[in-house]
Image (spheres, grey):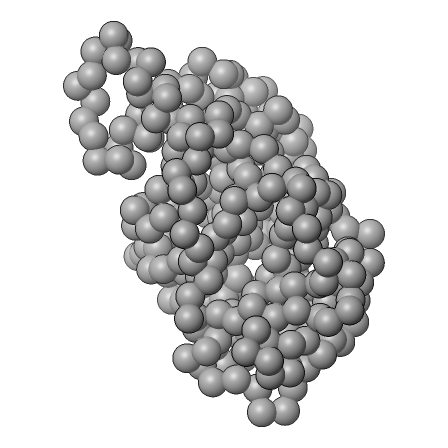
Amino acid sequence: MSFIESIAPSKLFIGIRSKPRHERRVATTGALERSIVMRTHRLLALALTVFAVACGQGLSASFDDSATLAEGVQRERVGIHGMILVGEPSDLLLSHIPMFHAPHDVQLIARGKLVGTNPAIPSSFSDRLYTFVPKPLSLDALRLGRLKSITGALYEGNFETDGRKVADNVSLAITGIVHQHELSPAEPQPELAYFIVGAGANVFAFHRIAGSPGFDEVLNVTLGRGGLNNSSLATGLSVVARSVPDLASQRLGLVTSTMTELSGAQLRISSVQSLSCLSGPMFTDACE
């Protein structure tokens, strides 16, 4: 059973981040160049182009149609959407790093695979943090299954802080959507909740983000005796820790938890390695 939720097309406005994520990287990696590239008018023009391509439209529209295109961009959440990468090149998972405002107000877990070969790319993304910065794209087209491939830069570590660029122009085929939902700062979530996804030794837990401030945690985990079959793990499971509040101080990366699957079965989950934990509502700083 997939986690895909039925969501009406968004009417939220689109824009660049108030503090674009990749502009907060260290100055020694070309801050001046990034500042120029991210000027609002240039990003908007690029976003319009990406939206047209993502929707399968040509670029023959005249300047008189720019207002219509801009409205489409707003609806499609076009922007630069950084992601956490886990798994292996032939079977990987991408977790969008969200925020509580457009165009980044979506939690998304997608399945994909590397296209082509590149000796610089590691054989596994499971032993440390890797992040991926795709070229501007429509987050709505991606989360609703219309966007089938993305291209961008791969970093070892967090691309926003001290990450090291591993490769450029890395192409990924998107093979499925495990989960996606729009974020609402007021959404209640009284108990700690995670999505469990993977296969074999590569099993990962993704904290389900609800109301603000929230936190975004991704872990490599092991399951208790009996575990689960690969079919269940491939499509993903939603689990909750009964009577455990949804707080970063109670997160799975700090403890071994017995969680309850939605079907009622209990599952013991242990953290092998916390790959990333970011505190909301901006999701830029590490969890304490």
Image coords of residue 208 (percent x, y) = 61, 57
Relative to residue 91, is residue 107 depicted above or below? above
Q: Number of numbered discs present? A: 0
Image coords of residue 6 (percent x, y) = 41, 52
Q: Is residue 115 visible?
A: yes
The answer to which image quadrant residue 161 occupies is top right
Image coords of residue 79 (percent x, y) = 46, 32
- Which residue occupies 37% across, 21% down? 71
Seen from this angle, which residue lies furthest bottom? 226
Q: Quadrant of the N terminus?
A: bottom left
278 on left or right of 101 = right
Q: Nearer the viewer, residue 27 or 41?
A: 41
Q: Is residue 120 visible?
A: no
Relative to residue 45, is residue 156 depicted above or below? below
Relative to residue 121, is residue 73 depicted above or below? above
- Which residue occupies 48% across, 52% down? 180
157 on left or right of 237 = right
The answer to which image quadrant residue 9 occupies is top left
208 on left or right of 181 = right
Q: Nearer the viewer, residue 248 or 148?
A: 248
- Which residue occupies 48% across, 75% down? 233
The answer to which image quadrant residue 68 occupies is top left
- Which residue occupies 66% across, 69% down? 240
